[in-house]
């Protein structure tokens, strides 16, 4: 431990799930990080497996940072960004900056901004040109491990001790869901469709309900997930494998279509579905990380409907909201968690998320 750091003496090595290449993730013994000036080391309590983790595992390219780069990840890197842990070490100045003490439960936003590029200096840090994301860059080792470091410049928050760690692990995805709902600019009385009610979509249902829409519709191929969506606030569940989803929404809106459509399926067909389901002058929010390019008739966007198309990326300024909503029970994340596995069973966890059939949120517990 550096002489300026506060906290525990940590073991020299730890277990971690290290990504080396697509379909080459290994449980390894690696050096335990130490907290330098402005840094924090946490003992992981839980780490969720995100759909983006599974897509990276299968070899899907990422375009974060340089849009012309089609690389995978900066391997070798410890995977995981949906994390929660307990502060084990505080580097010099970190306690004062973040209001944290050893033993506090803490979370870090998934991006570590550079604080120097055009976006960071304008407060748009989530679009940082450098774009270091936990679990995808060597300078931002992730949370599928026993310990991890929050580097200097990270955005860190204290989480109330009353929040169970398995619920706290949902803060990151819920922050992303809240941001997507904000991008939808929902007005009183709006008919809102959330397409895809996995972890992120269910969070969007919970967040959108707090906006008091006139009608909140969940669309998914799983009846079980649609039932959970109703528990979180959806008024209607629509399964496109059993009925014409576009016609159902039109029937519910006097033929006009929904006011806001949020795409969270990760499937190209849902984009086309949304363009036909949404009304003229409506707002389309694209959230998903797509594995392959999407081809649609762009005439619908402009000449036919004059739509507002909004992208949604990460959860900027939403972590305090997500922490508060979970803490106060305004959004119940408990039904979203379907599996908790030990770190050693990371491969089973990845396989579950890849299959997408019998799980929603899968957590790893070191």
Image (spheres, rainbow, N blue to C red):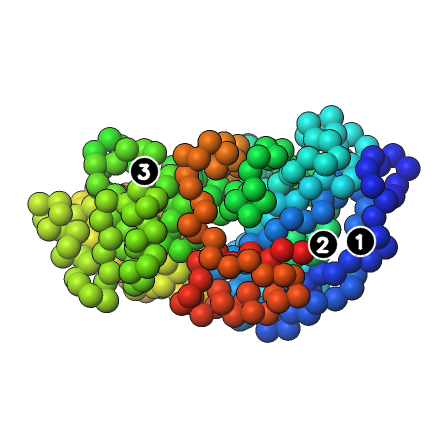
Q: Residues within 10 Å of mark 1 (few under 14, many from 20)?
A: some
Farthest residue, direction right? 3
* Quadrant of the frame with the C terminus: bottom right
Q: Nearer the viewer, residue 39 or 302?
A: 39
Q: Is 328 drawn above or below residue 75 in the view shown? A: above
User: In the rendered view, does 163 fall on the left or right side of 279?
Assistant: right
At horizontal 70% and vertical 31% (from top left) the residue drawn is 100
For marks 2 and 3, the one nearer the N-term is 2
Q: Nearer the viewer, residue 216 or 360?
A: 360
Q: Position of residue 70 (x, y in %)?
A: 55, 64
Which numbered tag is attached to residue 146?
2
Dots 3, 1 in contact, CB < 8 A: no
- Residue 209: give its label: 3
Alpha-carbon neighbours of circle 2 within 10 Å: few (<14), some, or many (≥20)? Answer: many
Using the numbered discs, state the Cα–Cα distance from disc 2 to disc 3 in whole angstroms.
36 Å
Q: CA distance from mark 3 to mark 1?
A: 42 Å
What is the residue that sits farthest to the left in this orientation? 254
Q: Earlier in the sequence, mark 2 or mark 1?
A: 1
Given residues 64 and 209, the one toward you in this image is: 209
Q: Can the viewer see residue 98?
A: yes
Q: Residue 314: x, y in percent? A: 50, 45
Looking at the image, residue 189 sits to the left or right of residue 98; the answer is: left
Residue pointed to by mark 1: 32
Residue 203 pos. (x, y %): 41, 45
Instruction: Please tell me how crowded label 3 is: few (under 14), some (14-19), or many (20+) other residues with Cα within 10 Å.
Output: many
- Find numbered disc 3 in the image and state the secondary structure of the residue it sits on: helix
Residue at disc 1, secondary structure: loop
Q: Position of residue 286 (x, y in %)?
A: 37, 51
Q: Is residue 269 toward the left or the right of residue 177 in the image?
A: left
Is 180 left or right of 365, judged from the image as shown? Answer: left
Q: Are marks 2 and 1 in contact (CB under 8 Å)?
A: yes
């Amino acid at each position: 431990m550096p002489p300026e750091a506060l906290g525990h003496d940590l073991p020299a090595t730890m277990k971690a799930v290290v990504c080396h290449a697509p379909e080459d993730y290994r449980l390894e013994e690696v050096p335990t990080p130490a907290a330098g000036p402005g840094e924090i080391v946490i003992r992981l309590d839980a780490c969720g497996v995100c759909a983006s983790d599974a897509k990276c595992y299968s070899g899907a390219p990422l375009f974060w940072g340089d849009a012309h780069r089609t690389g995978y990840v900066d391997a070798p890197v410890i995977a995981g960004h949906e994390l929660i842990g307990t502060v084990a070490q505080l580097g010099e100045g970190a306690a004062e900056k973040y209001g944290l003490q050893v033993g506090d439960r803490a979370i870090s936003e998934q991006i570590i901004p550079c604080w120097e590029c055009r976006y960071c200096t304008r407060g748009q840090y989530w679009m940082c040109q450098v774009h270091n994301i936990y679990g995808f860059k060597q300078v931002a080792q992730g949370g599928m491990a026993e310990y991890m470091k929050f580097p200097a410049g990270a955005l860190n928050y204290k989480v109330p001790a009353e929040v169970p760690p398995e619920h706290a692990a949902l803060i990151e995805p819920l922050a992303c869901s809240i941001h997507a709902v904000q991008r939808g600019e929902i007005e009183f009385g709006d008919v809102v469709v959330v397409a895809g009610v996995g972890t992120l979509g269910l969070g969007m249902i919970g967040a959108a309900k707090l906006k008091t829409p006139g009608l909140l519709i969940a669309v998914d191929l799983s009846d079980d997930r649609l039932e959970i969506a109703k528990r979180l606030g959806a008024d209607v569940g629509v399964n496109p494998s059993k009925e014409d989803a576009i016609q159902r929404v039109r029937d519910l809106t006097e033929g006009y279509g929904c006011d806001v459509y949020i795409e969270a399926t990760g499937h190209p067909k849902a984009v086309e579905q949304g363009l036909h389901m949404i009304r003229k002058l409506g707002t389309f929010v694209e959230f998903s990380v797509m594995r392959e390019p999407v081809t649609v008739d762009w005439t619908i966007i402009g000449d036919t409907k004059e739509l507002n198309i909004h992208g949604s990326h990460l959860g900027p300024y939403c972590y305090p909201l997500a922490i508060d909503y979970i803490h106060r029970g305004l959004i119940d994340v408990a039904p979203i968690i379907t599996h908790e596995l030990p770190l050693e069973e990371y491969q089973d966890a990845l396989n579950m998320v890849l299959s997408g059939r019998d799980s929603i949120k899968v957590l790893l517990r070191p």
